[in-house]
């Protein structure tokens, strides 16, 4: 329930030595790719920006596996799979259902699962809930530019995603007659448990995440 989530996050905020990194990501190419992919898809199969974020996170966990871990009192547990909790708005408030084994799923499979997950959560189906190895919370639909999420139980990091905004930048295309172009950017914030992940590792994770979002075709491979 929402109360259970609130209690767990309150405890984690007291216990975990948090630190935070953020980065501005150009998702102009991602939005264009999403539009092409969704052109011929039915509504219940369309790919969302969140689906790209989920897919990218799983890919980066393979590249920087030290983040896919959790603190225990006498050891650090390293996961060889990636289960992602995704914050969803429901009638009962914001809840954190989980998508299992995201590392083995493509965009289409992730999109289908997130669509069905929303229905399961709205129906209160308990199978939709559980502990993941990473959490993504997207508050962009509320106009929030950036925020710092709390690291959840059995995880070492959590990603906060803000709203998509437009910015005008110099046009680097030599074939274009326009001096400027509009870019779509989003601020992402990574909260980390310093007992598990040091600043250099988390910075590498965030850089890899930014790189793959700005070249999203690689997510289709």
Image: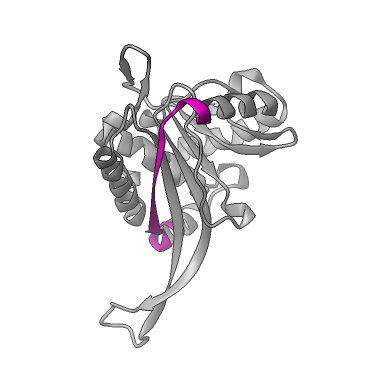
Place of residue 64 in the rendered image (x, y in percent of width and height, measured from the top left): 26, 35
Query: Total label count?
Result: 0
Q: Quadrant of residue 205?
A: top left
* Residue 102 located within the stretch drawn in magenta: no
In the picture, the quarter occupied by the N terminus is: top right
Q: Position of residue 75 (x, y in %)?
A: 31, 14
**In percent of the image, x 39 and y 29: which residue is there?**
156
Along the line of sight, which residue is nearer the eye, 184 or 198? Answer: 198
Asked whether 158 or 45 is in front, the reply is 158
| Farthest residue, direction bottom | 177
Q: From the viewer's perspective, tell me whether residue 2 is left or right of residue 159.
A: right
Relative vertical location of residue 70 with respect to residue 218 in this rendering, above or below: above
Report the coloring of the rendering: one colour
Quarter where residue 221 is shown = top left
Q: Which residues are magenta?
A: 13-30
- Quadrant of res 77: top left
Query: Which residue appears at 50% of the width and 21% of the height?
Result: 131
């Amino acid at each position: 329930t929402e109360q259970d989530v609130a209690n767990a996050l309150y405890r984690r905020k007291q216990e975990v030595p948090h630190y935070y990194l953020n980065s501005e990501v150009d998702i102009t190419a991602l939005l264009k790719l999403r539009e092409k992919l969704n052109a011929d898809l039915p509504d219940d199969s369309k790919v969302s920006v969140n689906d790209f974020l989920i897919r990218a996170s799983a890919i980066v966990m393979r590249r920087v596996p030290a983040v896919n871990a959790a603190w225990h009192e006498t050891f650090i547990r390293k996961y060889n799979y990636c289960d992602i909790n995704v914050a969803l708005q429901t009638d009962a408030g914001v809840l954190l259902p989980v998508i299992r084994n995201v590392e083995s799923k493509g965009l289409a499979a992730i999109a289908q699962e997130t669509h069905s997950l929303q229905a399961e959560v709205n129906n209160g189906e308990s199978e939709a809930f559980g502990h993941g190895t990473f959490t993504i919370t997207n508050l962009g639909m509320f106009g929030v530019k950036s925020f710092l999420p709390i690291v959840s139980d059995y995880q070492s990091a959590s990603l906060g995603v803000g709203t998509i905004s437009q910015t005008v930048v110099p046009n680097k295309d030599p074939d274009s007659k326009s001096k400027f172009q509009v870019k779509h950017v989003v601020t992402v914030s990574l909260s980390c448990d310093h007992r598990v992940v040091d600043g250099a590792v988390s910075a590498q994770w965030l850089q890899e995440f930014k790189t793959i979002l700005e070249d999203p075709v690689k997510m289709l491979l």
